Amino acid sequence: MRRLVHHVTLALLLTGCLVTAGAQAPFAALSINSAGPQVMDITTGITTLPQGGSVVDRDTGVSFDAAHIRYLDGSFIEATGVTMDGAFGSLSADLVRIEMADSLLTASGNLRLHRDGLVVTATDLRYYALSNIAVFDGGVTGSEPSFSAERVLLDVISGDVLLVGGYSFTSGMFTLTSPTEGGTLELRLQEVDGVLVYDAATDVSPDLLRRFSAHF
């Protein structure tokens, strides 16, 4: 079994080298370690790890453990029962899928994200590794700070957040709510007395709007 696991890891890394010969791409150098037997469908080329295992991407820093994994070398990885760490924070979800060609990670089901100063729950997540943008959809709520929104966008680099559509934000004794037709509210990450906190601003930064413009 060790020889088989070593072969799988090497194959994925070689694929990454071929994909990134011109430019380094996220999720191109994934390595997989199986917690048990592996089953490969010779017709589709898809390998299944019925007892799960761990996945690490050396370029993005994404790593996770999963109860069940299936993948097609150089194409996708799909995992269930996932606990994950990455630049976006710590994530738990029922289902995670990585599309290597698109540098896209999607997650759904009992989704919860923790990062400094922020906790988010939602139905779905899309993480665009090339632009370092995370998009949350479906009953999005937050604590630390407390908010709800139709859609939430996170700049993984700066930590700044944008609430989109119908939203509500509560801090202390005051609450901000969106206009009836919906709107946008920026949550700016700041450090106060050594503690990371989010400060709400209805005057959204033009730079942040440009960062998020493709994902509204």
Image (tube, rainbow, N blue to C red):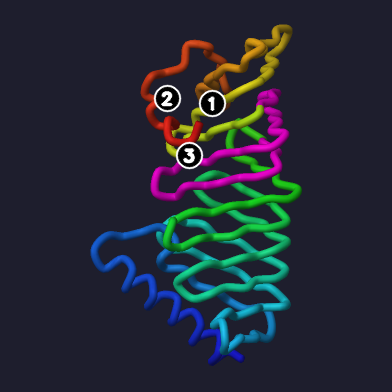
Q: Position of residue 88 (x, y in %)?
A: 53, 44
For the residue pair 35 and 74, the one nearer the viewer reads as: 74
Q: Secondary structure beneath disc 2?
A: helix
Cα separation between marks 2 and 3: 14 Å
Give the residue drawn at x 48%, y 35%: 215
Q: Depth-wise, is mark 2 or mark 3 nearer the camera? A: 2
| Residue type of the residue flagged with mark 3 | Val
Give the residue drawn at x 68%, y 58%: 95
Q: Can you tell which quarter of the image residue 68 is in? A: bottom right
| Residue type of the residue flagged with mark 1 | Leu
Residue corresponding to mark 1: 162
- Please give the count of numbered marks on the rendered protein: 3
1 or 2: tag closer to the N-terminus: 1
3 or 1: tag closer to the N-terminus: 3
Residue 156's tag is: 3
Q: Depth-wise, is mark 3 or mark 1 nearer the camera? A: 1
| Range covered by the magenta-colored residues | 120-149
- Looking at the image, is 29 positioned above or below residue 134? below
2 or 3: tag closer to the N-terminus: 3
Q: Position of residue 52 (x, y in %)?
A: 68, 73
Q: Main secondary structure of the magenta part?
A: strand
Residue corresponding to mark 2: 209
